Amino acid sequence: MLSAASAAVVRATLPVVRDHAAEITAEFYPSMFAAHPELLNLFNQGNQASGKQQLALAAAVVAYAQHLLDGTPFGPIAERIAHKHVSLGVRPEQYPIVGRHLIGAVAAVLGDAVTPEVAAAWDEVYWLFAVSLIAAEARLFQTAGVTPDTLWRPWRVAKRAEEAADTVSFTLLPDDGGPVPAFEPGQYVSVAVDLPDGQRQPRQYSLSQAPGRDELRITVRRVRGVDGAPDGAVSSFLHDHVRADDTVLVGPPAGEVALQPGDRPVVLISAGIGITPMVSMLGHLSATQPRRTVVAVHAEISADRHAHREEYVRLAGPQQMTWYENGDGDGRSGRVDVDAIPLPADAIVHLCGPITFMRDVRAALLRRGVSADDVHYEVFGPGMLER
């Protein structure tokens, strides 16, 4: 709980910090990386270059401060951040580094407005945030049976399969003789590669087949740069350089948005490469709950980009709907019409796809009477803080 004195200061200064949060985080990251270049390996440098990561941190700090002041729910966001941190191997001893440079960035941007009292109050906000994350991450590390030192394991590519245009699957086996970890359908793993420039970069990819096998599978869509942005560094590396019998570093399964247990009907709505966790969920449901009601909906630009198409159709069963934006003949034409989706009573809905797609579909589901608590979604990257 925030102390009374700090709460008064944070309440008075929160509007100013909120208005300048993006500037603060834009100052913070270069300062921290200049002093600690080893931390570059933890962060998606594509998101750094685009500014998305800066906005994500700004949103997190402001949202947590608001939570401390008035109890605005923050638990789901904190849980999502903790899972992401564990998937990357964030260490407790790195939090003081972040805190020092973050408060320094606040002072650099706001100047004389940052009195010792203001600095102390926001330092208290940061450390309450940090301590809660450190505790949550310790529990997740313990559950996974790993530490930051043992997080990354070498996995051998047993099979590479071209799934669709710009989309490749990699079936992975432990190269260290260790066990294949258990996971929940819908979770992801981090994959780290050493790029040609010598920099190690991690990315998260959903596990794209059901648990309970002696292997893991990820499916990677090549990220094509648009509007002058570069192509995705890691997805391009995996597509261009990783073949059968090569090895990659893989972290433990993570992610708090997994298939909900029980026997309530399930509606799975995905777009693009967001189909990957849905294939995992469908495979699990087919094997363990074949009589559970499932409605599967997928949207894609065109049929040739529909990853895992045959597998998806086979697993989804009769209640499935596909939309192709370009009007391919074997799917509905245009964008997903949520009003056309059959929604069983008391259904649980899982979404995965671009942020704008999920935002629009979620809003339409709420208009149709689906409870917000029954709509579950995972977002990779800094957009995960948008609600």
Image (cartoon, helix red, strand yellow):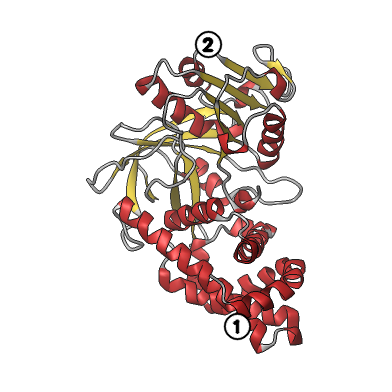
Residue that appears at 46% across and 46% down: 255
Residue that appears at 57% across and 38% down: 373
Residue that appears at 38% across and 54% down: 140
- Few, some or many residues within 10 Å of mark 2 (<14, 14–19, 20+): few
**Secondary-structure class at tag 2:** loop
Q: Is residue 335 visible?
A: yes
Q: Distance of mark 2 from mark 1, alpha carbons? A: 60 Å
Q: Position of residue 257 (x, y in %)?
A: 49, 41
- Left or right of 381? Residue 246 is left
The residue lying furthest to the front in this view is 4
Between residues 80 and 90, which one lies in front from this camera angle?
Answer: 80
**Secondary-structure class at tag 1:** helix
Which residue, given by chain and number where applicable, does mark 1 sit on?
120
Q: Is residue 31 visible?
A: no
Q: Which amino acid is tagged 1?
A: Ala
Q: Position of residue 226 (x, y in %)?
A: 72, 45
